Amino acid sequence: MKKVIALLFILTFLHATTIEGKIINSDTFETMDNVIIKISGDTTFQSVFSKGYNISAEPGEYLLEARYYEDGEIKYSTKEQVLLKGEKVKYDLVLFPESFTGEYDLEEEEYPEIEGETDLFVVYVLGAAAVAIFIGLLYLGGRPKKQETETGQNEPMDEDCEKVIRVLKEQEGRMLQKELREVLNFSEPKMSIIMTELEALGRIKRIKKGREKIVKLI
């Protein structure tokens, strides 16, 4: 009997996989301490983690929940459906204010994970934009310096960038990039270029939740 139990334990260990990642505050983009993380499925486990987490479980579908308490109440939280296939999985958890949880629950069928191939047109457009930005920085670097700003908040923006900022302000400074693109009726390549420009100006930050990106006004 002891040999059977030992054998089962060894087999479970050999088939177990690991999911790990950082624990990030969506407001500050800093890692968080004292976060309760629970994984539910074929394996159920709960513990307190700081900065990052590391959990071993058998392959399968799991619900991954993270909660941060303050004064006895949930301050930040998130829920993610994850699929463990046997290999090591890296999955950062972004915790949002409790009032926002559920607003960005994403379905896997609606946002399929893209593997391998990338749209060449997008690559070309982004490459051209990077070259243009580089040339612009060289040009600006050779001009006499005016009063510097810390984050580029006072840098001029084109009309499309201003539209993005205006919509974000109307949505309390936070929105899914996909929804933002649909509201503005922008193409994916155009939206990617605008996001890159606004990030360079220090006006927005983007963080991943599931298979989507959330744009946050800063």
Image: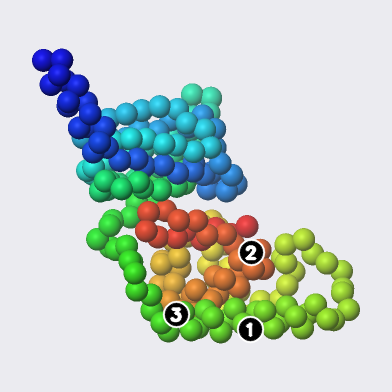
Tag 2's secondary structure?
loop
Label 3 close to label 1 by CB (< 8 Å): no
Q: Position of residue 83 (x, y in %)?
A: 27, 48
Name the colour scheme: rainbow
State the residue position of label 3.
Answer: 122
Tag 3's secondary structure?
helix
Q: Residue at x 67, y 79 (%)?
A: 134
Q: Position of residue 113 (x, y in %)?
A: 32, 62
Total marks placed: 3
State the residue position of label 1.
Answer: 132
- Which of the image's four quarters has the C terminus? bottom right
Q: Earlier in the sequence, mark 1 or mark 2?
A: 1
Q: Earlier in the sequence, mark 3 or mark 2?
A: 3
1 vs 2, front mark: 1
Left or right: residue 131 compared with residue 102: right
Q: How many angstroms separate mark 3 from mark 1 (CA)?
A: 15 Å
Mark 2 belongs to which amino acid? Arg
Q: Specify the quadrant of the image occupied by residue 179.
A: bottom left
Above or below residue 105? Residue 64 is above
What number is the disc on residue 203?
2
Q: How many angstroms separate mark 1 from mark 2 (CA)?
A: 19 Å
Q: Residue at x 37, y 58 (%)?
A: 211
Tag 1's secondary structure?
helix
What number is the disc on residue 25?
none
Mark 3 belongs to which amino acid? Val
